[in-house]
Image: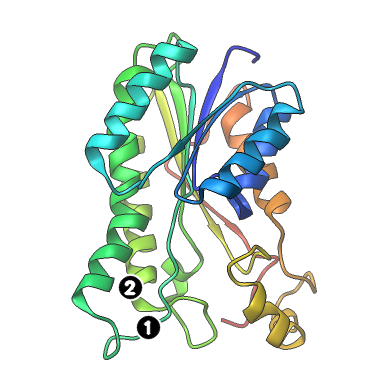
């Protein structure tokens, strides 16, 4: 495990940061990609204190060419790539009659196209590994329910996240048995971005969750690390809901 390398996009804060910490504890070298330079540096410092090697890249995940360049550098530095967590994403609360074409394009690029970019970049190197590799894509319960009124993001975000489920199932078929590809669908997770929404309506939101609390990055990290490390593995092409059973959508 000490020689394995994981790439986490959107790794500067929130779920990405939580998963990076958990993967480091599981023995992975870490590569963190994000646009938030200060947060990225702070998270890298925290993880290095765990005794883990960390590389950081301040980069736009929707840039296809840049993904190829970074992955080539990572492979040269660490020798191999074993796990990719396509976590980076962008919220989009606007409805159909409010959103601009540019905002639609940007939301699709950051949430959906980025998964294609980084899968396309890492897969050739994973196929060279004796044990293949693992990929987990970040979707959302909005992919299944639609961007409902109470959601932080609405229809455009939901469309992108639904596309990730189709991408995940298709790549699992195309890349198996060497590479396992799965997706996660978190519900309401208490991170930096939706905290204002949670604080304003926490009692109302929690009332619709069977486990009577909102989720945390650690709740997501447990599953991500499991999918990255479990041996033997007979799980691919699946999506996993992490929402404490959010029955009021």
Crowd band around label 2 with a 10 angstrom C-alpha radius: few (<14), some (14–19), many (20+): many
Q: Is residue 150 above or below residue 35?
A: below
- Looking at the image, tell me whether mark 1 or mark 2 is earlier in sequence order: 1
Residue 174 visible to an observer of this rendering: no
Give how far across and how far down residue 20 sits, in percent.
Answer: 63, 38
Checking the image for residue 94, the label placed there is: 1
Task: Judge left or right: residue 28 versus residue 140.
Answer: right
Q: Is residue 4 above or below residue 181?
A: above
Q: Nearer the viewer, residue 110 or 157?
A: 110
Residue drawn 49% across and 88% down? 149
Residue drawn 36% across and 36% down? 172
Image quadrant for the N terminus? Answer: top right
Image quadrant for the C terminus? Answer: bottom right
Q: Quadrant of residue 212?
A: bottom right
Residue identified by numbered label 2: 156
Residue drawn 56% across and 17% down? 4
């Amino acid at each position: 495990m000490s020689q394995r390398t994981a790439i986490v996009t959107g790794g500067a804060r929130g779920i990405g940061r939580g998963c990076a910490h958990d993967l480091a504890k599981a023995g992975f070298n870490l590569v963190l990609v994000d646009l938030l330079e200060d947060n990225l540096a702070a998270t890298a410092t925290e993880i290095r204190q765990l005794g883990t090697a960390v590389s950081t890249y301040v980069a736009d995940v929707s840039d296809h060419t840049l993904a190829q360049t970074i992955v080539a550098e990572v492979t040269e530095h660490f020798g191999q790539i074993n796990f990719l967590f396509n976590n980076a994403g962008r919220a989009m609360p606007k409805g159909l009659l409010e959103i601009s074409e540019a905002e639609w394009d940007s939301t699709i690029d950051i949430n959906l196209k980025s998964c294609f970019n980084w899968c396309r970049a890492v897969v050739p190197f994973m196929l060279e590994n004796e044990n293949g590799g693992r990929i987990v894509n970040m979707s959302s319960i909005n992919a299944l329910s639609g961007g409902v009124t109470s959601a932080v993001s609405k229809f455009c975000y939901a469309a992108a996240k639904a596309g990730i489920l189709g991408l995940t199932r298709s790549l699992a078929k195309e890349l198996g048995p060497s590479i396992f590809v799965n997706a996660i669908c978190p519900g309401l997770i208490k991170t930096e971005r939706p905290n204002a929404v949670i604080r304003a309506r926490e009692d109302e939101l929690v009332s619709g969750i069977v486990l009577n609390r909102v989720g945390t990055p650690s709740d997501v990290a447990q599953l991500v690390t499991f999918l990255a490390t479990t041996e033997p593995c007979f799980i691919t092409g699946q999506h996993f809901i992490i929402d404490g059973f959010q029955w009021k959508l």
